Amino acid sequence: MKKRIKVEIASFSRENAVSQKNGSGTFRYLLNNTDAWVDLILSKTALILATVIILAAVYGLAGSSSDLVKKDELEVIAIDLASNIDAAGSIHSITRDGVKTYSFDAYSGQLIDYDKMDISVSGEYVVCTFADNGHNISAARQLSYKTLPFSPIQLRILLNGQLGANGDRSHPVNSVFPYTDITEYLAITATEEFYLNTSKEVRIERASVFVTDGSEVNELEYVLVYQ
Amino acid sequence: MNLNMSSFISDDSAFLEPNNDIIATAMVVIGFVVFAAILSKTFIAFNDNSQALESYEQAAMMAKDIASSPSFQGSRPELISAEELDRIVDPSADKERYMFFQRFSPNLDFYVEAVTDDGNYQWTIAEGTVSRDGRDVIASSIPVVIELGSSARCVPGTITVKIMQNRWE
């Protein structure tokens, strides 16, 4: 038995030696080889590649889900502020003449760092933007009522400067129906976003701009948001 | 070649065996793709629903606001006056309608419907023409009591706010 194995090994190494001498022998050796190791290596490589791709996809999915959670938090912040502004604009708001205050501390975010977040109010939207490792996540919410990011004093100064009357009850602005000069001027000035300081409280109040066409006085209502 | 079941089972040439890991991988990949597709579909549906819910809340708030608006108030604060509704839907009452809608953001495309529950009376308050083709409509109604005429005949009715929104494409 031992002798036979020895003989076989000897013949194998002789064959090898011969084929190496011939030069093209390596190729023939590969062709004649029936161990299927090329097949094995190829399929294992494919398996490893597929595993890497699937793991990367799962990792990406998990990463994007944390982005989604952050976006949800941002949306909650934006909706909270926007609904407070809307509530001030509705008829039964208690802030008919008073000022309502809103502070960001009421909501304690878990993922959102207030220092890295920009929250702005314009005449049409509340926009929250959060800078997260180089890319921005934002959430926006439309406002239901006409909103101006000005303080009452700023509003009166603006109206006085542009239209010659500050629009309060005793100094109505002269304008004819449909008052496009006033509404468009205010809408255009309000498109500029007003960035809120999250450590200070936001003041929300209703303001009226009185307009007159000489015979009757009408009231245009706005919600003011300022700090 | 005889391809019946027994030859398939008793075949020991292992023509599938060397590739079974590739088949298994393919199944895992297909499974993962299907999983990701279902997940994203679910997320899109959830997002749509939460969007609709948000708009619904907005519509509900506006409906409540409009129902208590002093411009529609009847002889008592909780009544809606049909006369005032008639006045505001009148085609020549541009100014009244303007004053009614001026508080709301110009971005909102909406109209208000007031109907009595028996269906005899209906008022539609809209500023300009509101086109609704191909757009999502979000509506919210609240029950009100409408005071018909000066005889103080009161009937139940609803005020509906319909907000038109462009679809996400």
Image: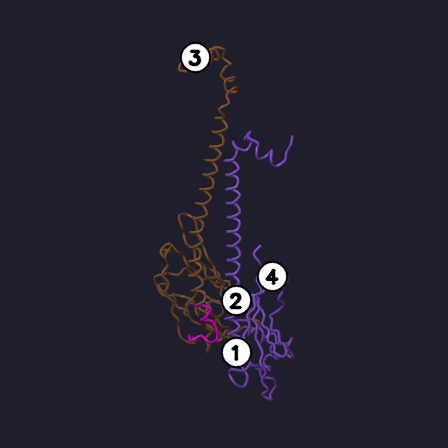
Chain colours: A brown, B purple
Label 2: which secondary element:
helix
Left or right, residue A92 beside residue A115: right
The quadrant of the image that shows the C terminus of chain A is bottom left
Is there CB contact under 8 Å for labels 2 and 3?
A: no
In reply to whether residue A152 is colored magenta, the answer given is no
Q: Which residues are magenta?
A: A84-94
Measured from the top left, where is residue A99 in percent x and y?
Answer: 39, 72
| Sequence-first tag of 2 and 4 | 2
Q: The disc numbered 2 marks a residue on which chain?
A: B
Q: Which residue has dot 3 on it?
A: A7
Report which quarter residue B127 is drawn in: bottom right
Label 1: few (<14), some or many (≥20) within 10 Å? some
- Which amino acid, by three-letter code, is at mark 1? Val
Query: Which of the 4 quarters of the picture holds residue B11?
Result: top right
Q: Secondary structure at mark 4?
A: strand
Q: Three-letter amino acid code at disc 3?
A: Val
Mark 4, residue position: B135
* Residue occupied by mark 1: A217
**Residue under circle 2?**
B56
Q: Chain under label 3? A: A
Q: Are marks 1 and 2 in contact (CB under 8 Å)?
A: no
Taking depth in this image into account, of B137 and A125 the one nearest to the observer is B137
The CA distance from mark 3 to mark 4 is 87 Å
How far across and how far down the image is residue A219, in percent?
A: 51, 75
Amino acid type at circle 2 is Tyr
Q: Amino acid at mark 4?
A: Arg
10 Å neighbourhood of mark 2: few (<14), some, or many (≥20)?
Answer: some
